[in-house]
């Protein structure tokens, strides 16, 4: 991770508005210190310095014990944008499940996603990446699902459906399957 790059990425998000929040999470205390130094030198040259300073005051640098703690925090926080510049990128990619858009490596700034790299930029904010993906074409499409269960298929899954329906206290759901299974049994016994 290059501290100057990290500071520039944090500031690129901080300049959006005084109520913005950016987080630096790391398992390396030296990175946090170097980023803080770089933030101060870079912020001085920004036209939106006042806005960025207010946002930075809402923000945090957090040093965690290990990569597992990094994953836990990211998955809980569910950031809109996540930049991974870490020596264990592969591990983090395998375990992070909640982020709107992920930018990998030192040469993938989030601002490239805003303007040029082609990724979706309508992303879930406020932790909604735990439940939702970015808005895309399928967000505006209507889909219909279709099912046809063969008699043999219902005989295979029917008992599980009956058990789950009864466990939920939905006897009519169970009965809809039970009646069909009985009819299938009668048909088989006639043969």
Image (cartoon, rainbow, N blue to C red):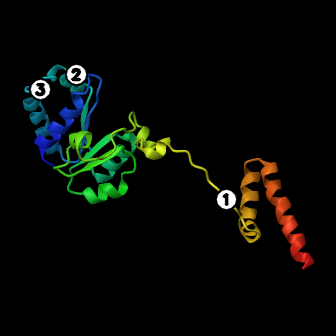
Residue 190 x, y percent position in the rendering: 92, 77
Q: CA distance from mark 3 to mark 1?
A: 58 Å
Category of crowding for the residue at label 1, using alpha-carbon neighbours closer than 10 angstroms: few (below 14), some (14–19), many (at least 20): few
Residue drawn at (15%, 37%) of the image = 8
Mark 3, secondary structure of its residue: loop
Q: Nearer the viewer, residue 153 or 51?
A: 153
Q: Which mark is residue 48?
A: none
Q: Which mark is residue 46?
A: 3
- Counting residues from the N terminus, which is met first, the one under dot 2 or under dot 3? 3
Category of crowding for the residue at label 3, using alpha-carbon neighbours closer than 10 angstroms: few (below 14), some (14–19), many (at least 20): few
Residue drawn at (36%, 55%) of the image = 95
Q: Nearer the viewer, mark 3 or mark 1?
A: 1
Residue 31 location, quadrant: top left
Residue assigned mark 1: 147
Mark 3 vs 1: CB contact within 8 A: no
Residue assigned mark 2: 54
Mark 1, secondary structure of its residue: loop
Residue 82 x, y percent position in the rendering: 29, 44
Residue drawn at (75%, 63%) of the image = 158
Q: Nearer the viewer, residue 62 or 155?
A: 155
127 left or right of 114?
right
109 left or right of 147?
left
Q: Nearer the viewer, mark 2 or mark 1?
A: 1
Q: Nearer the viewer, residue 20 or 190?
A: 190
């Amino acid at each position: 991770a290059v501290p100057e790059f990290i500071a520039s990425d944090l500031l690129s998000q901080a300049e959006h508005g005084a109520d913005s929040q950016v987080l630096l999470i790391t398992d390396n205390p030296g990175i946090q210190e170097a980023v803080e130094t770089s933030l101060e030198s870079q912020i001085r040259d920004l036209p939106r310095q006042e806005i960025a300073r207010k946002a930075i005051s809402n923000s945090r640098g957090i040093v965690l014990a290990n990569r597992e703690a990094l994953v836990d925090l990211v998955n809980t926080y569910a950031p809109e944008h996540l930049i991974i510049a870490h020596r264990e990128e592969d591990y983090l990619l395998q375990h992070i499940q909640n982020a709107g858009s992920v930018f990998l490596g030192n040469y993938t700034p989030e601002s490239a996603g805003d303007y040029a790299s082609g990724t979706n930029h309508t992303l879930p904010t406020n932790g909604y990446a735990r439940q939702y993906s970015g808005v895309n074409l399928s967000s505006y499409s209507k889909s219909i699902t279709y099912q046809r269960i063969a008699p043999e298929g219902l005989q295979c899954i029917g008992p599980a459906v009956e058990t789950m329906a009864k466990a939920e206290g939905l006897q009519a759901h169970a009965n809809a399957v039970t009646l069909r299974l009985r009819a299938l049994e009668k048909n088989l016994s006639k043969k």
